[in-house]
Amino acid sequence: MSLTTDLLAPRREQPRAAATPPPAALPLATAATAAVLSVVATAVTAAWSVRDAVPGTATTAAVGALAVSTAVLPLLRPALRALRGARDATTAWADDRRADARRSAARSREDAWTVLGWSLLVVCLIGGAWFVLANDRAVQRTFFDGGVIGLSVSEITSAFGTNLFIALVSQALILVWGLALALARMAPGRAGRPLRLLATGYIDGFRAVPAVIVIYLIGFGLPLAEVPLLSSLSPIWFAVLALTLTYGAYVAEVFRAGIESISPGQTAAARSLGLSRSATLRHVVLPQATRRVVPPLLNDFISLQKDTALVNVIGTIDAFNQSKIYASNHFNLSSVTVVALLFVVITIPQARLVDRLVAREHKRGKEA
């Protein structure tokens, strides 16, 4: 058969592939509806189990259960909407309206997952409240005693200034020391090999040893060894020195990663314009690298702030040590809860700042 005949011959109809139906939404919608009803039942059960632990006994428990149920029942609306969407998806697929079926199934699954997520949150809140009030409020009296908190909060907050001082001074020293270590580890050529070996050994060693051991060794070892100048430091400065040595190793790796993330072409372009190696590093590489490493640096400094509580092992009267004094006097840990809350107050805003900086850097990268 000639080529012209082949082109003019009618094409045979190819068999149409069977369409794949959307994922079944009915089981998920049913689970969401059951979850709402289960949360209401859980609230009633939890309230009944702690009815003797709160003033007002059964009346207060009933009011609490009613309040939780009233807050949860609005979730029935999206749950029922998910059931209706799943039914509409099945009907639309049977009527060969595939686009409508997929849209209905997608909306049904989204509503169902929304209900399941909020139900999980409410269950966690109920579980937390039950944990605090169960066993005749034993947990509440141990960790959240208002009387002990009122007595200790003033002195603990004052002692918390020591933690902040150690953290702020250490952060300033760590930035300088960490950058110096990073540059030493990246020293070029054969002449820089001894620096690279020293920096690598230091970084690996201090990242392997727990911070509390470094604090203990410096806080007690230097005075015992009677090291000139260093042995006469106060416990606060021993803590600053130990944390600087430890976290300098972590920050050095952060700086090194930021410097190596800069394109080599930028260094080459700067050198071709006549800038020296040090001028290129100072004016071209470091400004860009610093912007990139700010989020991980803040994460390290958040960890540093929490580790300032470790300085109590060398006798520094910080917030944690002060809280232990109150805990010993009152046989109650509510004062330690005050310390935990103080760390939460200063840490969470920084964590949100890190998230914001990461999002801004991500947006800048997409626009570039």
Image: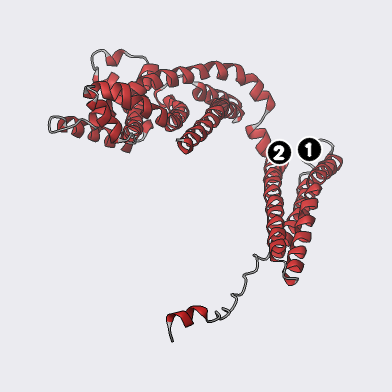
Indicate the quadrant where residue 67 lies.
top right
Residue for point 77% across, 52% down: 78
Indicate the quadrant where residue 26 lies.
bottom right
Marks 1 and 2 sit apart, C-alpha to C-alpha, by 8 Å
Q: Check if mark 1's residue and mark 2's residue have beta carbons within 8 Å.
A: yes
Q: Which residue is mark 2?
A: 137
Amino acid on which the number 1 mark rests in the picture: Val
Amino acid on which the number 2 mark rests in the picture: Arg
Image: 229 above or below 197: above
Residue for point 70% across, 41% down: 129
Q: Give the class, few, some or many, for how many residues have Cα within 10 Å of label 1's Cα (few <14, many ≥20).
A: some
**Left or right position of 305 against 71:** left
Q: Give the class, few, some or many, for how many residues have Cα within 10 Å of label 2's Cα (few <14, many ≥20).
A: some
Tag shown at residue 211: none
**Left or right position of 62 against 121:** right
Q: Which residue is mark 1?
A: 54
